[in-house]
Image: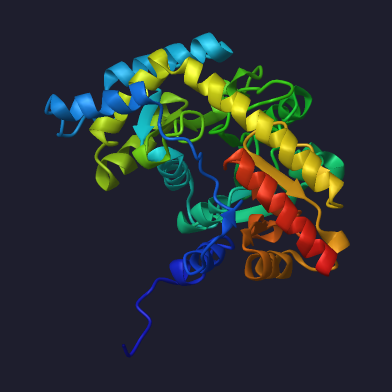
Amino acid sequence: MSKNYLSQRVAGLKPSGIRKFFDIIATMPDVISLGIGEPDFVTPKPILQAGVQSLQRGETGYTSNSGTLALREALAEHLQLKYGVSYQPLSEMVVTVGVSEALYLAMTALLDPGDEVIVPTPCFVAYQAEVELAGGVAVEIASTVDENFMLNPAKVEAAITDKTKAILIGYPNNPTGAVASREVLTEVARIAEQHDLIVISDEIYDRLVYAGEHICFPTIPGAKERTILLGGFSKDYAMTGWRVGYAAGPAEIIAGMLRVHQYTIMSAPTMAQAAALEALQHGEEHVIAMRDEYNRRRRLIVDGLNEIGLPTFEPNGAFYAFPNIEAAGLDGDTFATRLLQEKQVAVVPGAAFGPGGEGFVRCSYATQYEKIEQALERIYQFLRGL
């Protein structure tokens, strides 16, 4: 072609720091992957059957743009019972194609060209990209291991300009496993109110907390009226492929998100919504069982990494360990590349998740216990050979 037809916005996006490792994995046998952020469990059988039964009933058409009323009512009841936060199913909730679409909707509905969004890092790799695709500017502020990978409110406040429109947070955190304290979140709520900002809170891992408690951000006094809460079923219920999530927030903002949603998506998959309803109504025992198994793996990988000489931040949520690999004398990209090529173990360089991640790698323990044991032995042998 004689000219580049891609928009500058798309052409300027950084390639995902995760994708290249998955591309290499696909060409190699005997790889133990600690790279993918996806449950290794099959969707629990009753939830799976609810989706199948929806299809068998012939429910193959669109639902309401907002999602089925039954699912929104169940979500509202769940959030009320679990966290004590109240949302109106008819006007303050929209069911989306995973949390990824919910994040896209939030950014597209909120941002005008040049608007800034403060993004604490390390964070999920899509955060900055979604801001930029909506025409905004992602202002990264690094959280450090000395801060327990929690956003520093003073850094947030220092990053605010007259173009700042929102703060985007994600706890429990991917990639570090950090769980935010009530004190820190209260400060964020105060800053948002003082500067009249929106807070987008991605809480996809809310049920996967092993120590302490998950603080649902809109429960912080004064926060609900300026918070967009994002959640879903992929991680807690092992439903990644079903692609169903949600956003809850002030009615006028949800109405704006719904406008974008109805023109780009129409509605989330009908059978997935039926499965999600079953998950909310009868899935608790499965969430607890999977969380207990993740916790068992968490102790194995964190203790194992520490023992072989990679100091590892204590992850209290999600399903990731974030070891410091500086003792190896390699940067994260080189460490991950050589470990994959020489010992067939896949991890992700910490720098892929933004400032604050360099010198670390992300290891997902959403894989079988025995495979984690094998991976630890291979990593130990790799370190011995350096």
Q: Which quarter of the figure is the C terminus placed in?
A: bottom right
Residue at x-position 87% and y-position 43%: 146
The answer to whether any part of residue 130 appears in the image is: yes
Relative height, residue 43 to residue 325 (above, below): above
Q: Quadrant of the N terminus?
A: bottom left
Residue 89: quadrant of the picture: top left
- Residue 324 pos. (x, y %): 81, 53
- The residue at 60%/28% (across/down) is 293
Q: Residue at x 81, y 58 (%)?
A: 325
Name which quarter of the figure residue 312 lies in.
top right
Relative depth, front residue between 130 and 308: 308
In this view, the residue farthest toward the left is 58
Q: Position of residue 102 (x, y in %)?
A: 43, 39
How is the structure coloured here?
rainbow
Q: Is residue 119 visible?
A: no
Relative height, residue 165 to residue 53 (above, below)? below
So how many labels did they put on this image? 0
| Picture coordinates of residue 24, whole percent (x, y) | 53, 68
Q: Position of residue 70 (x, y in %)?
A: 29, 16
Would you say 319 lies left or right of 282 here?
A: right
Vertical comparison of 160 with 76: above or below: below
Q: Nearer the viewer, residue 297 or 89?
A: 297
